[in-house]
Image (cartoon, helix red, strand yellow):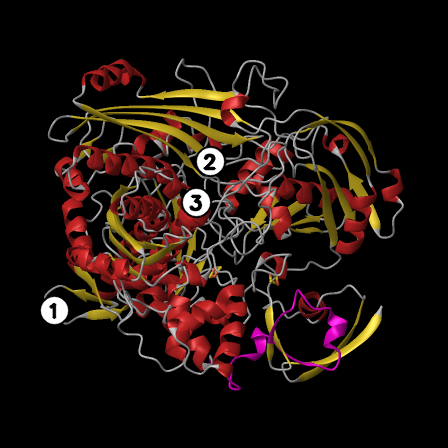
Amino acid sequence: MTKVSMTVNGKAVSGEVEGRTLLVDFLRQGLGLTGTHVGCDTSQCGACVVHVDGKAVKSCTMFALEAEGAHVTTIEGMANPDGSLSTLQQAFQDHHGLQCGFCTPGMIMSAAALLAENPRPSEAEIREYLEGNLCRCTGYHNIVKAIMAASGQDVSSIAAE
Amino acid sequence: MPDGGIGASSKRREDVRFLTGKGNYTDDINIHGQAYVHFLRSDVAHGRIRRLDTAEAEKMPGVLRIFTAADFEGVGGIPCGWQVTDRHGNPMQEPKHPVLAEGKVRYVGEMIAGVVAETPAQARDAAEAIVVDIEELPAVIDMKEAVKDGAPKVHDELESNLCYDWGFVEENREAVDEAIRNAHHVTTLELVNNRLVANPMEPRVAIGVYDRASDEHTLYTTSQNPHVIRLLMGAFVLGIPEHKLRVISPDVGGGFGSKIFHYAEEAFCTFAAKAVGRPVKWTCSRSEAFISDAQGRDHVTKIELALDEEGHFLAIRTDTYANMGAYLSTFAPSVPTWLHGTLMAGNYKTPLIYVNVKAVFTNTVPVDAYRGAGRPEASFQLERVIDKAAREMGIDPVELRRRNFITEFPYATPVAVEYDTGDYNATMDKLLEMADVAGFEKRLEESRKRGKLRGLGINCYIEACGIAPSSLVGQLGARAGLYESATVRVNATGGLVIMTGSHSHGQGHETAFPQVVADMIGIDPSMVEVVHGDTANTPMGMGTYGSRSLAVGGSAIVRATEKIIAKAKKIAAHLLEASEADIELKDGQFTVAGTDKSVAWGDVTLAAYVPHNYPLEDLEPGLEETAFYDPSNFTYPAGAYACEVEVDPDTGKVEIVSFCAADDFGNVVNPMIVDGQVHGGLGQGIGQALLEHAVYDENGQLLTGSFMDYAMPRASDVPFYKVDHSCQTPCTHNPLGVKGCGEAGAIGSPPAVVNAVVDALQRAGHDVTHIDMPLTPSRVWAAMQQG
Ligand code: FES
Ligand code: FES
């Protein structure tokens, strides 16, 4: 067991982990931050996406020890400081961008990273960017729409509210 | 009328917790002192276990106990919930389905042993140290091979690999044969309905807990129907009475059918928790899910459609081989039979129909219901053969459908169901407008200029939802009733709790059900809360599948709320010193008709629990009612779908450029949620049509056993969809007039995609009449090379 320390959602945290402990397991089991999900074991689904030093990372694909000293943000750290939903989270609710909610944390984290680097992505750019995030419930329609809306684009002409 | 009643696109209240990481999924639950199980699974499809030695593994660090079949002596097999009778009147062949493999393994993924240890890693390490020597036997994978004389048997004790040979309607068999023999035209189509993996994004999880003090078992499980699991596991597997067994399914990350069934892992964790004296948790990995979740579809079919000179349908004959996998999963036998054969009439007047289904055991993962379950298989073959017939006879495919539409309701089909209501021309009209079919030729030209082939596929679908009338399904072999339940508990200060037997795993019940109750009483939906997913605090219910939650579960909620209102009116009458018959409830106020005398909802609920001024001689205090609703018929959502594709002539790659769905779901409670359900179904249907395929090699190894090999639809594979449900013919036999919308998209879309691709190829001069799904670039390209 080795000690690991990092900043998660603005708070300094530390814990004992094995060399093989994945970041996602440290977040979920070590810190009780169960908003980050595990949907696969081949790094395909994106349910586990978090931000490490500002970059979207699949936390199932990184050892906890590799995040030593890093700034990690998880879905639990994405709401506004007063606890209300962020613009992106609110857009997902407004446009029904989630059903079972299991892919949602990863979708939000990926979408936030996309908007940080491309504040007004086109439909095609969003679909392309979400290549590593699977959703089985929504058929992606309302996810793409929500992200466009969160970036300030008019989505009223997109079929079917 | 309150804001957010029936018909409002209310935002979902459950979203807030899901969007902030506060969802409570089963894997998020950890019980103090829990141990972890890892299962040793068979890596061969068929074999005899010669030796199973756990001695070394037991000495590994952290191991608490290793279980094998010997530990489960005296424990029942995993039961099947439906018994199909074959066409000779005999019951289906029903092999034992042990919790852990007994002597033989029958598919890759079957559980041989379960290691319980202090940590997941220790359990996994110890499972690898178990010595297992399996004598490999020849595996049967192909269904037609499996039923040949002399084929290796999946179950030695059965006569053959044929589970049943079902004929429906058996009395029509000869008449159908004759009609086909004498018809002006017969169109024949052989096709495969490709095997799929449901893949809800949340893998399954089970946690068994045993309380020595009370002798009570609790199972946390990712189920669509916790009561059904409690009944099946308690009564048939472990022999635990319901009052000593609690099943909890908290937030569940999608199901699509695959989380209906009772799985051996659930029984294992419940059993092991008592045996080890510690809570036992199992979290399925995705790789494990691919070889242990029941899979879907997998039909091989030949359909013949007989037509007269004008294109009127005269008869349909269809022969299907349906894969059961190695064991009978909970509802498996019903899927290719009663959920498939009864839908073969589609939206059309066909006087004679005969459906034959041979269900076959193979050395593969069990196959059971997946979104649509039987109905997509029916729709696909019917809508494909109609398209083919239209082309053969030179009739426009839409016109051919219209010529045969059922237009008068109720309509009794020759396959034993009665459609209560519908308007297939209306949804078709709507569709043609949405899809701008009139402008297709112009778009075709544009595509041509860019060197692309373009095609348009149109089809209808119908499904039977709102599953199901108990007495009817009982006659058909169901070993369960299919009612739904609700308790509505009104609190003293006027808030309500709906305790429902339905289960939400993405469908938005926590938002939609309160809309219904709030609308009926005239209060704000925020006063209504939904409790579901826990057998300890909900009435016995059958859960969520078959697009039944609103049609059946919602009806139970309506009935319970009606009882609440009836009693509340009595209380109001007492408070207002008026006759009960004169009391009207509107906007949360009880008024004496024709006067301005009224009491508020909250006054009445308070009186019910503080019965100082209360008719105690005639009426019990309190305000809580339960209703069980058993539907008198199925509901029949139907619609018309259009898909437009572009095909790259050099690579065979198909791009869906537009997809339109015009559905008739009857009345709609929350249009936003309904649209979302259709979107999701379309995503899965397009996935089936273009991408997804569970492929086994001849040795029974699943070649598509991860998201690297099994092509799940991604955001870039699908377009924005156009969906509409403004054509509404309300269901005539449930109180809300609703039909159900959960499966429509997955049922209606695969034929639209294939029709569109075939259309594109034919317009480009290729002599192609069918391509089996998934329409991968290589299949489409190969089809273009051949004709
Ligand atoms: S869990 Fe990390 S990509 Fe699937
Ligand atoms: S909302 Fe269920 S997987 Fe995306």
- Position of residue B752 relative to residue A4, above or below, is above
Task: Tell me the residue that label 3 is attached to.
Answer: B774
Question: Of B178 and B344, which appears nearest the observer?
Answer: B178
In the image, what residue type sits under mark 3? Pro
In the image, what residue type sits under mark 2? Asp
Residue B679 in the magenta stretch? The answer is no
Pointers 3 and 2 within a single chain: yes
Mark 2 or mark 1: name the one nearer the start of the chain. Answer: 2
Residue B595's tag is: 1
Mark-to-mark CA distance, 3 and 2: 12 Å
Name the mark nearer the viewer: 2 or 1.
Answer: 2
The chain ID associated with circle 2 is B
- Percent coordinates x, y for residue A111 in the rendering: 49, 74
Q: Residues within 10 Å of mark 3 (few under 14, many from 20)?
A: many
- Percent coordinates x, y for residue B526 in the rendering: 37, 70
Image quadrant for the N terminus of chain B? bottom left
Helix or strand or loop: what does disc 2 sit on?
A: loop
The chain ID associated with circle 1 is B
**Observer able to see residue B578:** no
- Which residue is found at the position 27% from the left and 47% from the top? B764
- Which residue is found at the position 39% from the left and 72% from the top? A146
The chain ID associated with circle 3 is B
Helix or strand or loop: what does disc 3 sit on?
A: loop
Pointers 2 and 1 within a single chain: yes
> Magenta region: which residues?
A56-84
Task: Tell me the residue that label 2 is attached to.
Answer: B298
Q: Are marks 2 and 1 in contact (CB under 8 Å)?
A: no
